[in-house]
Image (tube, helix red, strand yellow):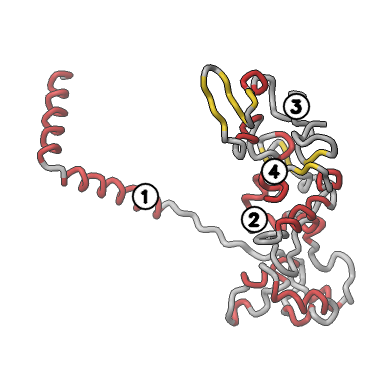
Amino acid sequence: MKPNLNRRIGRLVSRLKEHPQSILFLLLVAVAGVVVISCTGINRVEVAPPQIAGATYVGSESCAQCHQDIYRNFNTATHYHLKAPGDNAKNIGCESCHGPGSLHNESGGAPNTIINPRKSPQTCFQCHLDKQAEFNLPSHHPVIEGKVSCGDCHDPHKGSMIMGGGTELMSQNETCAKCHTAQLGPFVFEHEAMREGCVTCHNPHGSVNPRLLVSRNATLCLRCHFQQQTFGGRIYIGNVNHATFLSRGTCWSAGCHEAVHGSQVNDHLRF
């Protein structure tokens, strides 16, 4: 049986070589089959707004009666542009995150009659499923534990949700510096990576690496400091042979560049 099978395979390969267009046809058939199988297996999920028992939707204009300062600037917010036009969504504005507001209005703003996403990230996670996954990684900001809120770093009611985006990189760093004051400086000798923003080295939501680092060990530093020359067993970075240094551990834990955010006394970010 085996010799016969080998002969059949050999004849098939020979025919494909003679008619290369057959290979393309077979590939198209295979891709089409995968697409059909994939499409028929899709499970669509609709995200439902938060619900409050017994409450009905009243529209964002009703919220403006008490929250005029928020309502006035909401048209500048990133979330504002997610609102679907048309009659079907005319009452889904503020209430898409805070739940229907009729009971809140009737009670004059009584507690527990409206959803406050600052008290639980689950409202945000309804749309931002990827961030929920990141907050479950080994190193993460304690949002799920209730010690930090999404609203501590993001403003859903005004401007860009990602503070310090675009040309406002310093504002991004200042967002982190609200808690991490020592890392902002100012320093006599700065680490130029700070100009690019803290997220150059850290994933603010979560990471598999310690300290929210986007990469592990010296690999993190070599993402930028890749101007190295290697010859004769030597690895030169900044005109210094680092071959023996790199084997000791990370650049900052091997007793070398300990002041990774900036230094007051050493231009090589030591101490």
In the rendered view, would you say 193 is above or below 84? above
Q: In the image, what residue occupies the spot 83% across and 82% down?
A: 65
Q: Nearer the viewer, mark 3 or mark 1?
A: 3
Q: Quadrant of residue 241?
A: top right
Amino acid at the residue labelled 2: His
- Residue 242 placement: quadrant: top right
Task: Kindly identify the amino acid type of the residue bearing the numbered disc 3.
Answer: Cys
- 222 over 91 or under it: above or below: above
Q: Earlier in the sequence, mark 3 or mark 1?
A: 1
Residue marked by disc 2: 128
Q: Nearer the viewer, mark 3 or mark 2?
A: 3
The residue wearing badge 1 is: 37
Write the residue at 15% across / 33% down: 13
Residue 3 on image: x %, y %: 14, 18
In the structure shown, which secondary structural element does the residue marked by tag 2 occupy?
A: loop
**Counting residues from the N terminus, which is met first, the one under dot 4 or under dot 2?**
2
